[in-house]
Image (cartoon, rainbow, N blue to C red):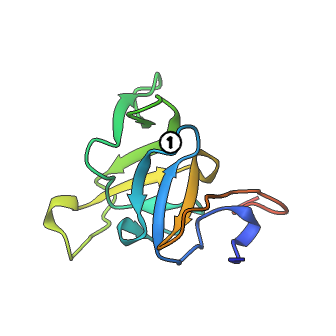
Amino acid sequence: MVNIANGGFDDLEEAGTYVCAGCSEPLYTSAMKFDCGCGWPGFWACLPNAIYEVRDADGFRVEILCNSCNGHVGHVFRGEGFRNAGDVDNYDERHCANSCSLAFIPEGGTEQRRCTYSGQVFGH
């Protein structure tokens, strides 16, 4: 069993694939993940055609949703100064995903792991 701090995926460093918790469609790989320091799993980009974007009603944030089931994944932020030096196509972008919107499948495995939040959540 993997140690997932507080039951979320922010600190998970294991290789694998993050899928939509609603429909199991692959959304991200662990190679796309980075420590953005916000307490939520951060990704440079998603798998091709995995998500779509909708501007929030507040006009500031941009929601990301699963392209297969329309489930909420999180928000995407651009222009924050993050640099993915290894991939010029994914420059200065952060997909801030909600752990409860994801499930994790370890590399070489088939069993999905879901978040189970318990105890204190980052910043609270």
Whether residue 61 is visible here, answered yes or no, is no
Q: Residue 105: x, y in percent?
A: 54, 63
Task: Residue at 75% x, 66% y: name it.
Answer: 6
Neighbours of disc 1 within 10 Å: few (<14), some (14-19), many (20+): many
For this orientation, the residue located farthest to the top is 57
Quadrant where the C terminus is found in the figure: bottom right
Q: Residue 102: x, y in percent?
A: 56, 50
- Based on the displayed image, in which of its 4 quarters is residue 54 positioned? top left
Instruction: Write down the residue under mark 1.
Output: 73
What amino acid is at disc 1? Val
Q: With respect to residue 4, does 43 lie above or below?
A: above
Task: Residue at 33% x, 61% y: name it.
Answer: 44
Quadrant where the N terminus is found in the figure: bottom right
Q: In screen coordinates, is 84 left or right of 101?
A: left
Task: Residue at 69% x, 57% y: name it.
Answer: 115
Q: With respect to residue 85, does 42 lie above or below?
A: above
Task: Residue at 46% x, 21% y: name it.
Answer: 57
Secondary element at tag 1: strand
Q: With respect to residue 57, does 114 lie above or below?
A: below
Q: Residue 75: x, y in percent?
A: 45, 43
